[in-house]
């Protein structure tokens, strides 16, 4: 048996999904490809809870972080980056590296992004977008995007909402159209339980209209180019990762067969089991109460255990968990409960961790 992954990505991939990648190649300017590609888009829309635009990028999620800031922010305007962990920090750096005028708001790790705080900065004016990570994988914090969206729409109707849902999309309900989000980006290797290498986005009409006002959007991540190719040529501008698309096609069938409500409930149950296990041993949780992620639990090392030894013990039993991320190394540890993982797998993990404690 291979080591089972309880890290926050890459996650376990079902054998049949891995095997689907072995099919022969097809040209990406062919009818076979068009059927595959359009089929995947048709399945992604209900999973991302949108009837607007869906794009598939042959890149990891960071590429779509770049797409979001390059397409959503006009020259002379600003993006507000709420930074509450390593991946929101990355997004801010991506914005700056792309020449975007970014206003960075540093929040304590463990805190969510909050509407009132966002409001305080947007009030200065000059913003085209606010960028928020829904699920900070480094801290296990899940911000309330619905509340942020309602607040921003009410007070700043022209500000776009850019949401990184890399480690939450498909594991947690994020109603893109209902909350009127403008771009939601995610990676294949997290709750979607696919190999790494693809990224998916839901994009609003508003976002595409904004992109038309941005003269230099780059090329690879130009949303208008992706849209043109999907609607007129029924393919992608550059050669896509066809093997990964085979896997995606099957995995989306599996996700839809499970049912979205059931999938979200399974993720929530695994989270609750993980909280109960941690708290039952006297550990506390890192995130501010009420903002705990449904896909990854970050546990404080308040008992002063040897976290590296715990991780090594799990590995010796063929189970892989995560140490604390960056500044939290040794001070916390992380248990992923997303994608293919179910209550039975959590019980197996807890048994092994119990034998260490
Ligand atoms: C919340 C979040 N955003 C962005 C990224 C970067 O995604 P990728 O590694 O797919 O580029 C990650 C990766 O773990 C992440 O967890």
Image: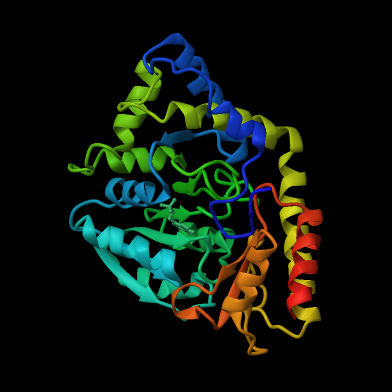
- Please, is residue 243 above or below residue 154 in the view? above
- Please, is residue 49 above or below residue 242 in the view? below
Report the quarter where the C terminus lies: bottom right
Observer able to see residue 291 = no
Q: How many marks?
A: 0
Going by the image, does 55 lie left or right of 254?
left
Image quadrant where residue 58 sits: top left
The spot of residue 79 in percent (x, y) is: 31, 61
- Please, is residue 183 above or below residue 272 in the view? above
Q: How is the image coloured?
A: rainbow
Tell me which residue sits at (36%, 60%) in the image: 91
Is 141 in front, or is 306?
306
The spot of residue 27 in percent (x, y) is: 39, 15
Image quadrant where residue 300 sits: bottom right
Is 91 in front, or is 318?
318
Observer able to see residue 292 = yes
- The quarter of the rendering in which ligand 1 is drawn is bottom left
Residue most toward the top? 31
The spot of residue 224 in percent (x, y) is: 31, 33
The spot of residue 151 in percent (x, y) is: 51, 63
Tell me which residue sits at (31%, 52%) in the image: 69
Is 45 in front, or is 308?
308
Going by the image, does 210 lie left or right of 314?
left
């Amino acid at each position: 048996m291979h080591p089972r992954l309880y890290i926050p990505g890459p996650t376990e991939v079902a054998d049949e999904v891995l095997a689907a990648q072995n099919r022969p190649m097809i040209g990406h300017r062919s009818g076979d490809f068009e059927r595959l590609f359009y089929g995947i888009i048709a399945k992604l829309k209900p999973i991302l809870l949108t009837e607007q635009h869906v794009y598939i990028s042959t890149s990891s999620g960071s590429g779509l972080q770049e797409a979001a800031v390059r397409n959503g922010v006009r020259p002379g305007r600003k993006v507000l980056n709420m930074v509450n962990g390593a991946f929101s920090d990355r997004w801010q750096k991506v914005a700056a590296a792309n020449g975007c005028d970014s206003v960075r708001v540093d929040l304590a790790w463990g805190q969510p992004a909050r509407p009132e705080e966002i409001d305080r900065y947007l009030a200065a004016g000059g913003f085209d977008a606010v960028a928020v990570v829904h699920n900070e994988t480094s801290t296990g914090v899940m911000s309330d995007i619905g509340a942020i969206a309602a607040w921003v729409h009410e007070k700043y109707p022209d500000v776009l909402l850019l949401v990184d849902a890399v480690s939450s999309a498909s594991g947690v309900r994020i109603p893109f159209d209902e909350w009127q989000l403008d771009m939601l980006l995610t990676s294949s290797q997290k709750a979607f339980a696919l190999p790494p290498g693809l990224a998916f986005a839901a994009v609003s009409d508003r976002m595409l209209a904004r992109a038309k006002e941005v003269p230099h959007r780059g090329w690879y991540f130009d949303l208008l180019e992706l849209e043109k190719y999907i609607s007129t040529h029924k393919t992608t501008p550059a050669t896509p990762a066809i093997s990964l698309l085979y896997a995606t096609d099957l995995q989306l069938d599996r996700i839809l067969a499970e049912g979205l409500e059931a999938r979200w409930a399974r993720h929530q149950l695994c989270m609750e089991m993980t909280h109960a296990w941690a708290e039952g041993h006297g550990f506390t949780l890192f995130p501010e109460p009420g903002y705990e992620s449904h896909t990854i639990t970050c546990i404080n090392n308040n008992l002063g255990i040897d976290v590296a030894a715990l991780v090594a013990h799990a590995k010796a039993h063929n189970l892989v968990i995560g140490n604390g991320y960056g500044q939290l190394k040794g001070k916390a540890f992380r248990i992923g409960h997303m994608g293919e993982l179910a209550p039975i797998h959590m019980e197996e993990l807890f048994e092994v961790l119990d034998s260490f404690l």
